[in-house]
Amino acid sequence: MDDTSPPTTAPPELPISERIRQRILQNGQRFHANDNIADFIEPGEIDTLLDEVAGKMQGVLESLIIDTDSDHNTQGTARRVARMYINEVFRGRFHRAPPVTEFPNAASLNELMIVGPVTVRSACSHHLVPIMGRLWIGVMPNQHSNLIGLSKYARLADWIMSRPQIQEEAITQMADLLMELVKPDGLAVVMEADHFCMHWRGVKDTGSKMVNSIMRGSFLKDAALRREFLAIINLKA
């Protein structure tokens, strides 16, 4: 039989970013800048995504008219930036939460516990420039609370902050996570930070800082407890 039909070709494979995006949409989830999308990334895909980001970053450098062929300072910059975003400064988007061991409150601790200042680093989701600051956490446990190791507060804060963020949403995410893990009677989170979108561009005001707080449970209801926490952390410390 004479088959004169043209040979069929397989459709081109979608870029890895599009495949991940389709999984997220199929599950009805959002993928805002400060969301974690690790559940939708399959084993081995991080490296493929890094390759894609590096290629697109190379295009950005070329559009900025930077000669990456002869400029020894920017040879390899595209891949370095891609690796930095995916595995470092934005890893809270692409990698799962750090493991956290929880212990029962066997001694029925019910006194104020404060952790901080924890150094935090993030990037403004408006301009992708640094946010550098400090975080304090106050916990009022009860007999049913789960206790977590001191270092885990810093690890969880780093995981939340290692995404494009705005400060107000970042500490809300931190508070929600700790309420779920620890289940305390009360929780307080205070953050003070420098925003390089103000220092480095725009008004170029290097003296301004942003301070905001989240109060939950007994910290919200008990003004004396709230004052005690704020007096102890004393932002000048």
Image: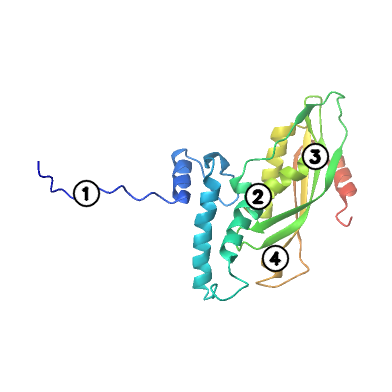
Query: Which of the labelled discs sits on residue 7, or is there none?
Result: 1
For the residues labelled 1 and 4, the Cα–Cα distance comes to 56 Å
Residue under label 2, please give it.
Answer: 169
- Name the amino acid type tagged 2: Glu
Residue underneath mark 3: 219
Viewer-nearest residue: 228 or 13: 13
Question: What is the quadrant of the N terminus in the image?
Answer: top left
Picture quadrant where residue 113 is located: top right
Q: Which mark is residue 196?
A: 4
Q: Nearer the viewer, residue 84 or 204?
A: 84
* Label pair 2/4, CB-CB below 8 angstroms: no
- Give the Cα separation between the discs numbered 3 and 4: 31 Å
Q: Are marks 2 and 1 in contact (CB under 8 Å)?
A: no
Q: Amino acid at mark 3?
A: Phe
Question: How far is mark 1 from mark 3, CA to CA?
Answer: 70 Å
Q: Are marks 1 and 4 in contact (CB under 8 Å)?
A: no
Q: Amino acid at mark 4?
A: Phe
The mark closer to the camera, 3 or 2, is 2
Q: Amino acid at mark 1?
A: Pro
